[in-house]
Amino acid sequence: DAGVTQSPTHLIKTRGQHVTLRCSPISGHKSVSWYQQVLGQGPQFIFQYYEKEERGRGNFPDRFSARQFPNYSSELNVNALLLGDSALYLCASSLWTGVDQPQHFGDGTRLSIL
Amino acid sequence: QQPVQSPQAVILREGEDAVINCSSSKALYSVHWYRQKHGEAPIFLMILLKGGEQKGHDKISASFNEKKQQSSLYLTASQLSYSGTYFCGGPAGGTSYGKLTFGQGTILTVHP
């Protein structure tokens, strides 16, 4: 079975630009979460979606937004990029949102802001 | 507030044992453990639930002290493949949400 797939794998942008990151969950998984991981730190929660509804939002500015589509894939959008947005963005999927659900991570999108 | 992990780094030789600890100042409904190798995605290892239930890897054991909000991951007879950064995480939003707050990580290096 295919795992969580993310695209693109790498992206270079300049300050002020906008970026869209994409994620396809494991087949059958209805929940998708997004995390930001800065080098040397643990992943930081950004959003969780379940059945196309936002179920949780981390401490990130409104420049960050996301959505989930009917096929359960998801997009993360970041507007007005800042240098500090440079990070690895991870998508994770799970069957649903319960605390007993393992999250399965994709390989991430490495975003570099110049 | 993120969980606090200790130690920050561990160096072992193959066959040695290690314990990684995770402590939270907030009540955790469950504790999740993941391992991440450099340049790769975090891989699920184990979930510990209130009441003692565990889900996960057969060759890795862990404990969860609900009263102290502490968890420990036990790596026995370590192998080269155990090298990586270990993260613990706990749900930040109550029992119905799986959003995780992760610790800062423990770097484990296993030498031949």
Image (cartoon, coloured by chain):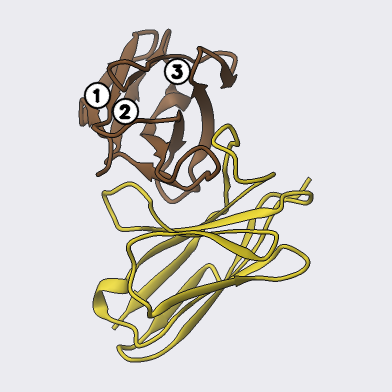
Chain colours: A yellow, B brown
Residue marked by disc 1:
B10
Q: Same chain for the residues at labels 1 and 3, yes or no?
A: yes
- Of pointers 2 and 1, the one earlier in the residue sequence: 1
Whole-percent x and y of residue B75? Answer: 41, 14
Side (left or right) of B97 relative to A23: left
| Chain identifier of the residue bearing label 3 in the image | B
Which residue is most to the bottom? A16
Q: Nearer the viewer, residue B54 or B94?
A: B94
In the structure shown, which secondary structural element does the residue marked by tag 1 occupy?
A: strand
Residue drawn at the location 43% of the way across and 23% of the way down: B80
Whole-percent x and y of residue A34? Answer: 50, 59
Q: Is residue A20 above or below residue B74?
A: below
**The residue under label 1 is which amino acid type?**
Val
Residue marked by disc 3:
B79
- Of pointers 1 and 3, the one earlier in the residue sequence: 1
Q: CA distance from mark 2 to mark 3?
A: 11 Å
Q: Is residue A109 above or below residue B103?
A: below
In the structure shown, which secondary structural element does the residue marked by tag 2 occupy?
A: strand
In the structure shown, which secondary structural element does the residue marked by tag 3 occupy?
A: loop
Side (left or right) of B25 relative to B67: left
User: Residue A112 — which label?
Assistant: none
| Chain identifier of the residue bearing label 1 in the image | B
**The residue under label 3 is which amino acid type?**
Gln
Residue drawn at the location 52% of the way across and 26% of the way down: B47
Residue drawn at the location 28% of the way across and 83% of the way down: A114
Q: Is residue A72 above or below residue B92?
A: below
Q: Marks 3 and 1: in contact by CB < 8 Å?
A: no
User: Residue B108 — which label?
Assistant: 2
Whole-percent x and y of residue A104? Answer: 59, 44
